[in-house]
Image: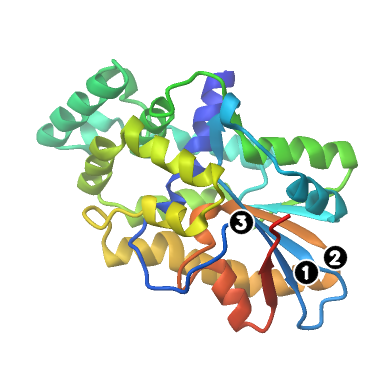
Amino acid sequence: MKNLFKLFIVTILLFGAKTQAQTSPKLENSLLWEVSGNGLSKPSYLYGTIHMICSPDYFLTDKTKKAFESSEKVMLEINFSDPKEMSEMQQLAMGKEPLSKKLSPEQLTKLDAVLKKSTGMTVQQVDSFSLLTVMSLISMKTFGCTDLKFYEMEFIEQAKKRNIEIGGLETVKEQFGILENAYSNDEMIAMLDESTPDETAKLVAAYKTENIDLLYDSTTDKKFTSEKTKKIILDSRNLNWVKNMPELMKKQSIFFAVGSGHLAGELGVINLLRKAGYTVKPILK
């Protein structure tokens, strides 16, 4: 059950950064950014996560701990502390119909080959899962470890210890719908074939240096990401989040933790907040 729980989390978090590259100003190397000005009485914070990472690679800097401790509420992409959201997540992780009915014979053959190569499993073993869940299963394997740590779950644990409120920018149902509409079955299978330990290692290396520009670049894939997908997965969500953030920040100091792929770019959260009149600066120490 614990492994299934992890799989469900990865399913709805992992693919937010698979987008086409955009032209944007170079940003400083920092996962943590302070948001102030524009009428705010207290600063809020924006933190980019990698969602999951092998335990030996997991880190949380002192600057991040300090910002977290000074915040009055935590906002994640999805509020995993809500039992209703968790229940919804478990239901959606299973496919509406078996993959053997959803996919063509050619697609099943390709998926079977990818699964065997990356996990040692066959397509028959995952027939009842959604294709998004299969994507997350393969992606987890590319980390090459069994002791994965999840940043969102760490933040939830710390928030509960401090007895502060936890919220979500999206619901599980909304995020599943976004991901399902963003990719065709052929695009998903092609992405699976490109998901390798080498690519994941590059992603982790960029994350550990807090280089969000490099992180953004390393999580783009022009070959398999259409303009439609970019808008659905990244741009529209960022615009929606930034539309809702002012009202939240006006009330109290918020610690926002979202996938680091959402920070950079012309329509990244940092640039959008700046355009909305806020001062957004990196916290380097």
Q: With 45 as the anchor, is 199 left or right in this view? A: left
- Viewer-nearest of discs 3 and 2: 3
Q: How far is mark 2 from mark 1, CA to CA?
A: 5 Å
Q: What amino acid type should be assigned to the residue bearing mark 1? A: Met
Q: With 147 as the anchor, is 59 left or right in this view? A: right
Q: Residue at x 54, y 46 (%)?
A: 209
Q: What amino acid type should be assigned to the residue bearing mark 3? A: Ser
Q: SS for tag 3?
A: loop
Q: SS for tag 1?
A: helix
Relative image position of residue 153 (x, y in whole percent): 67, 36
Q: Report the disc number at residue 249.
A: 1
Label 2 with label 1: CB-CB less than 8 Å: yes
Q: How far is mark 3 from mark 2, CA to CA?
A: 23 Å
How many other residues sit within 10 Å of disc 1, few (<14), some (14-19) or many (≥20)? many
Q: What amino acid type should be assigned to the residue bearing mark 2? A: Gln
Label 1 with label 3: CB-CB less than 8 Å: no
Relative image position of residue 74 (x, y in whole percent): 76, 52
Residue 123: tell me if it is visible.
Answer: no
Q: Report the disc number at residue 30.
A: 3
Q: Which residue is mark 2?
A: 252
Relative image position of residue 49 (x, y in whole percent): 58, 47
**Could you say which is closer to the camera, residue 202 or residue 257?**
202
- Viewer-nearest of discs 1 and 3: 3
Q: Earlier in the sequence, mark 3 or mark 2?
A: 3
